[in-house]
Image (tube, coloured by chain):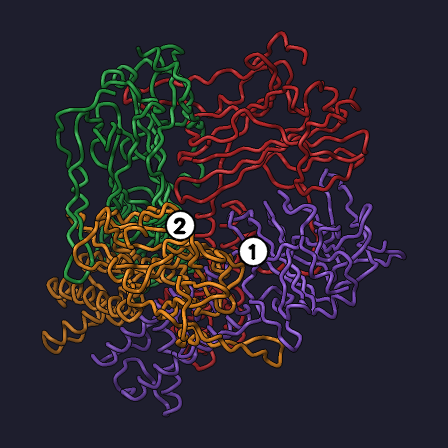
Chain colours: A purple, B red, C green, D orange
Amino acid sequence: MIKEMFSNKKKETVELGFGAKNYNSSVRFLNKDGSVNIRRNVGGFLDRFDIYHWLISISWSRFFVLVLFSYIVANTLFACIYYTIGSESFGGLSVAGSMDAFLQLFFFSAQTLTTVGYGHIYPATSLTGTVAAMESMLGLLGFAIATGILYGRFSRPVAHIEYSDKAVVAPYRDMTAFMFRIANKTQNELIETECQLVLAINNPETKRRDFNRLNLELPRVNFLPLTWTIVHPIDENSPMYGMTSEDLSNGDAEFIILIKSVNDTYFQTVYSRSSYKFSEVVWDAKFVPIPSKPNRDGSISINVKDIHHYERVETVLSV
Amino acid sequence: MIKEMFSNKKKETVELGFGAKNYNSSVRFLNKDGSVNIRRNVGGFLDRFDIYHWLISISWSRFFVLVLFSYIVANTLFACIYYTIGSESFGGLSVAGSMDAFLQLFFFSAQTLTTVGYGHIYPATSLTGTVAAMESMLGLLGFAIATGILYGRFSRPVAHIEYSDKAVVAPYRDMTAFMFRIANKTQNELIETECQLVLAINNPETKRRDFNRLNLELPRVNFLPLTWTIVHPIDENSPMYGMTSEDLSNGDAEFIILIKSVNDTYFQTVYSRSSYKFSEVVWDAKFVPIPSKPNRDGSISINVKDIHHYERVETVLSV
Amino acid sequence: MIKEMFSNKKKETVELGFGAKNYNSSVRFLNKDGSVNIRRNVGGFLDRFDIYHWLISISWSRFFVLVLFSYIVANTLFACIYYTIGSESFGGLSVAGSMDAFLQLFFFSAQTLTTVGYGHIYPATSLTGTVAAMESMLGLLGFAIATGILYGRFSRPVAHIEYSDKAVVAPYRDMTAFMFRIANKTQNELIETECQLVLAINNPETKRRDFNRLNLELPRVNFLPLTWTIVHPIDENSPMYGMTSEDLSNGDAEFIILIKSVNDTYFQTVYSRSSYKFSEVVWDAKFVPIPSKPNRDGSISINVKDIHHYERVETVLSV
Amino acid sequence: MIKEMFSNKKKETVELGFGAKNYNSSVRFLNKDGSVNIRRNVGGFLDRFDIYHWLISISWSRFFVLVLFSYIVANTLFACIYYTIGSESFGGLSVAGSMDAFLQLFFFSAQTLTTVGYGHIYPATSLTGTVAAMESMLGLLGFAIATGILYGRFSRPVAHIEYSDKAVVAPYRDMTAFMFRIANKTQNELIETECQLVLAINNPETKRRDFNRLNLELPRVNFLPLTWTIVHPIDENSPMYGMTSEDLSNGDAEFIILIKSVNDTYFQTVYSRSSYKFSEVVWDAKFVPIPSKPNRDGSISINVKDIHHYERVETVLSV
């Protein structure tokens, strides 16, 4: 029956760019968070763009630890230089021992790097003057770079879309449908949201991995203020027509979701991706309608976490 | 007659994303200023993007009060730390009492946070040196963040469109039309402006809320230097054909306006939204033509506020 | 004959958004530099966006004068405050007269605003400490704003397109054509460049201003490395078919040019506009081919200023 | 036979914007790195945009050398001004000779420009106070400009695409095809990638340079996680149908590649270009399949440098 299924000529195959190789082991192309599950080795050190990309992608806690660490390393380095030159080259230094001298030069370095420059310690020779002049310039450049990275982190457009934990296959109107729900997690609006749904499944006949587009009942909405249940009707034109839960499992099926939208704050086009593996598809279940109650002021409230709720249904029409 | 109206097959229904639920109480999906009238509860604390979104969305006065407040709080905090360490750990401090010591340490903190660092007060021990080194770094980071947010506020693209207070239904050429006027409120140009108009109305037959697209005589203009009267002709293809003011009221009608344009300063695509509830539609009225007078230098002047002016007309053709 | 011309049904009228009002005096909608020749009075003071728009639009010399002026005004203001409080509230002040005290406080203000803070003068009371703490914060905020505006000025995408001084009407292949030339003035590339050409002319029949699209032989090029001669063939489908130089003059004709391109540095869509009034159209002239010579290294050099050169031709085919 | 080839009516000629002039010497329109091989002379000094464009385009090492150089020049200049005014106008200066005075004023300048302002040297007269106030303001402006340029360098979107060193002409399925391979060099994803391929070749008949579009088997992929072999099938509709390696050489053929994609970090549209001259096309060769092995964690690894590997094949079907 599977063979018959695959000889169905109505399928629209799409090229996502993952190739058609049929890996022996189970492979997930897209992780749940939408990241692509491929590692590229370029050979040689990473170029600059990667460093910037990394710095704006890491978590805030790691970012601040990194800033603090760089600050301490830079000050230690300059303190070593100043200490090597000698504490007698500085004015205002009240030295009580070599450790104390090093610490005071460390603080002098911090005061120079941040351009605080209290001045109770100051460079008294041409050599220390030159090094301090360099350090204060590097300090300003460093904080200029930090400003750029901070703005890069802030202004990076992200579509914070919550996907329902599970997709369901359930009766829908007078047929069966594959469905999942999404909602906007943030307070800023997403407009002109479009969805594409692709089924990646191993074709036992060709020994290749097929990528079939699944048509959606409604591929585009103008607003996404509430939740959006994305519905693929499993009619005779669907590549899923006649498939069972076992067929998905045998074919190592992965439902790939591509969402394109416009963030209403900066009017930037944003993309979101996710995928459901066959094990994340619940058969004979339907989503619980989301309670949305009108408030006194005429507005409507919903709870985003409600999109995950589904309930078992007894009979699924045999398709 | 309403029933007949709704069985009209020529209507093009659109999916805006507000769902089709027919709320019992009167609901306004879009506020007059274009904001969406839905509250999403995500559960748990807000993520970082929301904070940035909030900081670039609040008014300038609130923003500056917030900056000032943060500055005072940060200095008070560090002054407490310095005071706890003890004023004897500072050089240059002329203490005349504990309150005076705290105040002087508060000013020392401000001089450190802003990196002014006069130096008449300075950290004299390793402990105060360390805290001051941290504070000056945090100060620079804080002002780096402020720089990013300030630029985010400045560069955020906005379509400052003035909508006429009322929409009118009036004779237009040889028929009747639904009309409203818009104008650009700012001196920078909007180009390639497009408009979509959707009528949200309760369908008494299906007990659902219908969203019908209203065709426009002219959906797109290259420039918006003067004003633009957006015209929906109420011909036999219009979902409004045969409707009366009472029908709109009974159906809790809302006219939803979606405008897309390009801001000529940054060439960014911007969006503007607004809506007219049935109570903001004036029947048997037409807009007063806007006086535009050529200036001596060959340019033309208009007054944007003139777009709100309308006048009663005696007869509306029965449609 | 003009009347006949206008009853030609093949014209495609376009709506640019300038309205169809036929002004008595001669009006130019677009200035030569592409700015729109309309003044909008909004009533009330300008909102913030306009100020930012103005600050990133003014010339660099005006911008720097403004920064300098603001700096002097701010320092004078704070010097006045400090002077009012009294020079005895400052440490390190060697006063030799009231003018000298004011000057020293002015310099102290500058040292505080820029956070240099030498410290030979310092605030010695709580009142001066508070004012100085405010000033240094305002200084940092002010330079944060300046950073944002400077980046806004830098990163503002502009299509630096040079338009030929004159458009020409000349024989072209086996017919007559309206032609003008453009070139990229800068070293960064423009890609995917598109052009629209619209003729605005008074219609003596309807007493309104018509906007007719003029079809182009080639409306789009992938690159703009050399020059681009934009050609509107005056064939029987052209609204210019049968027009003479006098017809353009009588109709107060304006050729409006809209160019859309992608700046290759930031991959941003940029727009450029210009217009030719009838007096800037030369009949019986053709453009001199631009000498482009291959360099030794295989590259090709051109001189952008050559696009303005045209030469008289003897016969124009009567159209 | 070439003549016949060119009278083939099925070719779709495209206008890239390079003109149709047939240069005598061998010309390469696009360099291997995608830069356009044309020099535009504008006459007069470069305008500001070019300076910004240059500053964000130069290498990081040149950029930092430039910043350091500017810093030294500015300090030397202000040191000269201060020296001309006289070292007696400064407080805290311990002069041991004119060279020493100059050096100390140089360091004072650096402390003022970076706003460190230790204060052991300070301006003691109105004249030096004024110059120092100007210098600290210029310092802040200078570092504001540096911040903007640094952010401009960071945030500039680039499509880091690796092109295979050679293109090949090889049997492909049941015909012959022109092929090359690309891969994403960085860790951030490219999505919605599109490719256009154009053959620039001298037409011996018209003595002009023809630009013919070459149809691709697959012009668009959603993802580019692995490598993408771009295939132009040389069927009877292809302008390359019947051409030999010698025809390409005689026609000074250049294969121009235009790639458009979306960078997944900032969701910005990015462009990449490259070209293959006839000498970079290998006939009777095919690409070695890229080894992609699934990792233990379910992800897949590839080595980007593998895209350059090709191997000879024995027979190419005569086309």
| Percent of width and height locating residue A182 | 69, 54
C262 up-or-down from B210: above or below: below
Is A35 or D241 nearer to us in this picture?
Answer: D241
Q: Residue B31 lies in what quarter of the image?
A: top right
Write the residue at 23% across / 16% down.
C246
What's the amino acid at mark 2?
Gln
Q: Helix, strand or loop at disc 2?
A: strand
Give left or right: position of B258 versus A67.
right
Q: Is residue B64 above or below residue D67?
A: above
Query: Residue lying farthest bottom?
Result: A97
Tell me if residue C134 can be seen.
no
Could you tell me which chain the residue with mark 1 belongs to? A
Please name the amino acid that badge 1 sits on. Answer: Tyr
SS at circle 1: strand
Quarter of the image where the C terminus of chain A is located: bottom right
User: Residue C187 at what x, y percent from top left?
Assistant: 25, 53
Q: How crowded is mark 1: few (under 14 residues within 10 Å), some or many (20 or more)?
A: many
Q: Where is residue B117 in the image (x, y as percent from the top left)?
A: 37, 67
Q: Which residue does the numbered mark 2 point to in the structure image?
A: C268
